[in-house]
Amino acid sequence: MATDVETSNKPETAASARTLIFELEGAALDGHTKLFEAASTVFQKAGVPLARIQAARYCTHGAIPQIVQKMVDELGGGKLSSDAVEQILSHYHDAFRHSPVALSPLFASLLAETSRRGMRAAAITTLPEDVAQVALSKSGLADQGVELHVFVEAERHFPRVDCWMKVVRQVAKSARACVAVAGSRDSSKSALSSGMRCVVIPDAFTGHQDFSGADAVLESAEDSDPAALLDQLL
């Protein structure tokens, strides 16, 4: 079940019925980096090295608690404490609360174009609601009227098709009126399966993945023409 927190009271119009739905920490923010740094802190205290390439194999498949558990089980070599998962998650959440939270420049450009068109924007996340609200505020997304949809952290896989569709049903009349912004192969596939168009913004942890089927993959400013892209997709 999701907890839906709306930070916008815009009246629905033909334009606003078209909606950008995006992964908050998976595509808009630097969540994969924060997760890697949180895990590295705990691993290093236990004397276990953790390479970025190792983390990349784990940190984009499934929901965060399951990802962390698998990293601890398979990469910890039995040297991490019994509360290592809780420690990593605590560091991860604290990174959003107490460290800078940066918007992906490519995402910021896309969001600016949707705002210019009067489209709605909705973020999905499994961050605890208080942490997600801080991230929304620090990144400037709250000031831009982005709606927040919080799913329980214990989701086995996130985002599933059902997660995307729950938000679609609340913000638009049709999945075809929505554009999903995903940050990994798995989230892209689930968005496409929900019937939405899908734009992928990969990062250093997901750039090696196969995004076949996605409507667009934005890897650099040279790839990005938000106005032309939205004209094509909507």
Image (cartoon, rainbow, N blue to C red):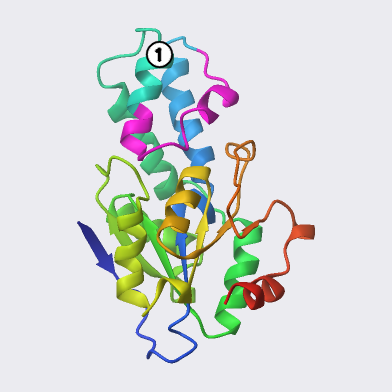
**Going 71% across and 74% down the picture, which residue do you hit?**
228
Q: Residue furthest left?
A: 1
Residue 73 located left or right of residue 212: left
Above or below for 15 versus 152: below
Apparent side of residue 87 relative to residue 209 in the rendered image (left or right): left
Say which quadrant the C terminus sits in: bottom right
202 in relation to 43, above or below: below
- Determine which quarter of the picture holds residue 8: bottom left
Helix, strand or loop under label 1: loop
Query: Where in the figure is residue 83, as x and y percent of width and height?
Result: 26, 21
Residue highlighted by disc 1: 76
Farthest right residue in view? 222
Closer to us: 156 or 120: 156
Which residue type carries mark 1? Gly
Q: Position of residue 91 (x, y in %)?
A: 38, 35
Q: Is residue 101 visible?
A: no
Q: Which residues are magenta?
A: 49-68
> Is residue 65 covered in magenta?
yes
Name the side, left or right, on which 50 lies relative to 163. right
In the picture, which quadrant includes the N terminus?
Answer: bottom left
Residue 94 in the figure: left or right of residue 49? left
Q: Residue at x 58, y 26 (%)?
A: 52
Residue 162's x, y, as percent? 30, 57
The image quarter in which residue 95 lies = top left
Please state which of residues 195 and 208 is positioned toward the viewer in this rendering. Answer: 195
Name the quadrant containing residue 199: bottom right
Q: Is residue 159 shown to the viewer in this render?
A: yes
- Crowdedness near tag 1: few (<14), some (14–19) or many (≥20) residues, C-alpha within 10 Å: many
Measured along the vertical axis of the image, is residue 46 above or below residue 229? above
Q: Residue at x 58, y 52 (%)?
A: 213
Rendered residue at 35%/66% (across/down): 148
Give coordinates of residue 35: x percent, y percent: 46, 36
